[in-house]
Image: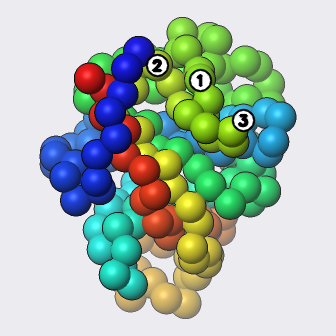
């Protein structure tokens, strides 16, 4: 496993494909443990003159607890590979099982705090810079409320992309 660091603006790929079709893993740690979840909602761009990623996590997700406790998180992209592993990480909760082992993924620490997976093609190390909750009162298009039958609105994390690692 060998990665090289590149600048965020040098990251190639279609983010609609990377997130919406290929999916990603959102991973956060609380110091001793970590949890990950599959996500297919999010994005990347420039905000406040910074390269950012924005991630959406519902409060009942186990990863939410870790994300709330940590200043940082990672986004791991697999280039369309590892679909079964990503399905396991999306359907199972780390509260109930070792879903990373069940998914057959190999975790590693990218620094003293953050984790990713050896199978990832691209890893973004991100630092939270803004947090808010989606609110029903802000929904201009009434059809999107159908995503929230239980009123379990996502929390939005806007994160500065501090490091981009690409598999060599």
Where on the picture, by quarter, is residue 104?
top right
Q: Position of residue 51 (x, y in %)?
A: 35, 67
User: In the drawing, what numbered circle is on residue 118?
Assistant: 2
Between the C-alphas of marks 3 and 2, the distance is: 15 Å
- The residue identified by callout 3 is 34
Seen from the viewer's position, the closer of residues 63 and 70 is 70
Q: Position of residue 147 (x, y in %)?
A: 48, 61
Q: Tell how many labels.
A: 3
Report the mark closest to the observer, 3 or 1: 1
Between the C-alphas of marks 1 and 2, the distance is: 7 Å
Task: Name the residue at 64% across, 12% down.
Answer: 101
* 48 relative position to 152: left or right: left
Are the residues at dot 1 and dot 2 in contact (C-beta closer than 8 Å)?
yes
First reached walking from the N terminus: tag 3 or tag 2: 3
Give the vertical position of 50 relative to 37 (above or below): below
Are the residues at dot 3 and dot 1 in contact (C-beta closer than 8 Å)?
no
**Element at label 1:** strand
Q: Is residue 108 visible?
A: yes
* 80 relative position to 32: left or right: left
Between the C-alphas of marks 3 and 1, the distance is: 11 Å
User: In the drawing, what numbered circle is on residue 83?
Assistant: none
Mark 1 crowdedness (10 Å alpha carbons): few <14, some 14-19, many ≥20: few
- The residue identified by callout 1 is 108
Task: Name the residue at 68% across, 60% down.
Answer: 71
């Amino acid at each position: 496993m060998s990665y090289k660091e590149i600048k965020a603006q040098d990251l190639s790929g279609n983010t609609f494909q990377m997130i919406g079709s290929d999916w990603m893993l959102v991973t956060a740690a609380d110091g001793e443990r970590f949890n990950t979840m599959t996500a297919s909602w999010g994005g990347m761009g420039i905000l406040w003159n910074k390269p950012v990623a924005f991630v959406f996590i519902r409060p009942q997700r186990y990863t939410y607890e870790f994300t709330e406790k940590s200043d940082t998180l990672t986004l791991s992209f697999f280039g369309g590979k590892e679909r079964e592993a990503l399905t396991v990480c999306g359907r199972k909760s780390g509260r109930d099982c070792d879903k990373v082992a069940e998914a057959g993924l190999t975790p590693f620490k990218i620094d003293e705090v953050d984790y990713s997976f050896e199978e990832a093609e691209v890893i973004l190390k991100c630092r939270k810079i803004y947090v808010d909750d989606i609110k029903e009162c802000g929904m201009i298009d009434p059809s999107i409320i159908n995503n929230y039958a239980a009123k379990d609105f996502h929390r939005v994390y806007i994160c500065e992309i501090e490091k981009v690692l690409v598999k060599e």
